[in-house]
Amino acid sequence: MDISLLKQVAGTSNKIALSTALNGEADVKIVNFVWYEDRPDTLYFSSVKTSAALKVYDQNPDVAFITVPNDGTPGNPYLRAQHVTLQRSEKTMTDLLPRYLETIPNYQQVWDAIGATLVVFELKVTDLFVDGGLGQAKETLNFN
């Protein structure tokens, strides 16, 4: 599978708008994420282990997301997926920290302040819409 457009677009963002719903109540949160080329169907994010959001994540693991381009990124490239499976990850923040520090400016400050309280989640994608931005290529990747 050619993931070159995915790599290009994933490199323009470190945040997603994560859409959840529970009992008919929709919610959207902006969260930082990391992604690895060798697991193109999986995005990782973390949440504070005492957050009320964890109850929503555990009770309704069917979510949607769209990436938020970094400031100044021309053309608004993005990744978007629906019916994504949200699950707790076997990975820890210690496992993911090097990638967070590499891709998210000033993440060391977040880590120093709340790193010990973070729990890791995975977003497992089946179909991922990749939009390279205004006038650029668009494709849907299927990871079945």
Image: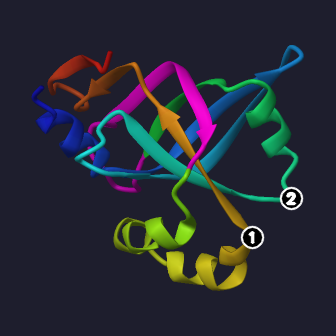
Horizontal and vertical percent for residue 86?
Answer: 60, 33
Q: Residue at x 75, y 24 (%)?
A: 60
What kind of element bears circle 2? loop
Displayed quadrant of residue 85: top right
Q: Which mark is residue 17?
A: none
Quarter of the image with the C terminus in it = top left
Looking at the image, residue 51 sits to the left or right of residue 99; the answer is right
Q: Earlier in the sequence, mark 2 or mark 1?
A: 2
Q: Magenta segment, which residues?
A: 69-89
Badge 2: how crowded within 10 Å, few (<14), some, or many (20+)? few
Q: CA distance from mark 2 to mark 1?
A: 8 Å
Q: Which element type, helix, strand or loop, lies under badge 1?
A: helix
Q: Is residue 8 left or right of residue 56?
A: left
- At horizontal 52% and vertical 75% (from top left) the residue drawn is 107
- Asked if the stretch drawn in magenta spans residue 133, the answer is no
Closer-to-camera residue (144/30): 144
Amino acid carrying label 1: it is Thr
**From the viewer's perspective, is 22 left or right of 138?**
right
Q: Which mark is residue 50?
A: 2
Give percent across and percent down for residue 79: 37, 32
Amino acid at dot 2: Thr
Q: Is residue 133 above or below residue 8?
A: above
Instruction: Give the answer, above or below, for where 120 lies relative to 103.
Output: above
Residue at horizontal 19 percent and vertical 44 percent from the top:
8
Density class for disc 1 (Cα within 10 Å; few <14, some 14-19, many ≥20) is some
Rendering coords of residue 131 (x, y %): 28, 26
Asked if the residue under mark 1 is in contact with the one under mark 2, i.e. CB atoms within 8 Å, the reply is yes
Question: Is 82 in the magenta?
Answer: yes
Give the position of the N terminus as an image quadrant.
Answer: top left
Disc sitting over residue 117 in the figure: 1
